Amino acid sequence: QVQLVESGGGLVQAEGSLRLSCKASGIIASFNTMAWYRQAPGKQRELVATITSGGTRNYADSVKGRFTISRDNAKNTMYLQMNSLKPEDTAVYYCAIDTTYTGEPDHWGQGTQVTVSS
């Protein structure tokens, strides 16, 4: 059974930093594309960043240059380093994994709240 568990969210002031972690179990995550999504109150969920099994990274325009996605295959864990945070980054952040190679995630974590104060 595939499980994803996020951690690292919290309250931070604008221009601060946070690092989110996503620990996978029940699967060797290094074989799969993983991603971070976020959902702010009253808004649709949006894709933040993806990382493929080969290490190719893509980012939403809104976070380019500020966020870095990475993975530690030995720990079966994905990370999101968030720097220069802005109040508009406030959201619940979810990690996700595509285990069926369809290009869409099919397993999700429970989410971790990130709140950026101005």
Image (cartoon, grey):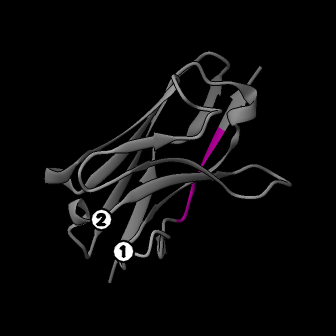
Residue 2 left/right relative to 80: left
In the displayed structure image, the side of residue 115 where residue 5 appears, left or right: left
Residue 7 on image: x %, y %: 45, 49
Residue at image location 22% in from the left, 59% down from the top: 30
Which of the 4 image quarters holds residue 45? Answer: bottom right
Mark 2 vs mark 1, foreground winner is: 1
Mark closer to the chain start, 2 or 1? 2
> Which residue occupies the extreme top position in the image?
15
Q: Is residue 28 above or below residue 26?
A: above
Q: Secondary structure at mark 2?
A: loop
The residue labelled by disc 1 is 101
**Which residue is at a point 53% across and 24% down the rendered structure image?**
66
Q: For residue 112: magenta?
A: yes
Against 62, is 48 above or below?
below
* Amino acid under disc 1: Tyr
* Residue 32: image tag: 2
Magenta stretch in the rendered image: 110-114
Residue 72 image offset from top left, x and y in percent: 22, 46
Does 39 sit above or below residue 26? above
Q: Is residue 26 above or below residue 77?
A: below
Please state the horizontal and vertical placement of residue 51, each as a whole percent of the image. 37, 49
CA gap between label 2 and label 1 equals: 7 Å
Disc 1 is placed on an element classified as: loop
Predominant secondary structure in magenta?
A: strand
- Inspect the magenta stretch and tell me whether residue 36 lies in it: no
Q: Position of residue 82 (x, y in %)?
A: 50, 30
**Marks 1 and 2: in contact by CB < 8 Å?**
yes
Q: Is residue 59 left or right of residue 81?
A: right
How crowded pointer 2 is (Cα within 10 Å; few <14, some 14-19, many 20+) is rated as some
Residue type, numbered disc 2: Asn
What residue lies at 54% left-to-right and 29% top-to-bottom? 64
Residue at (68%, 35%) from the top-left corner? Answer: 89
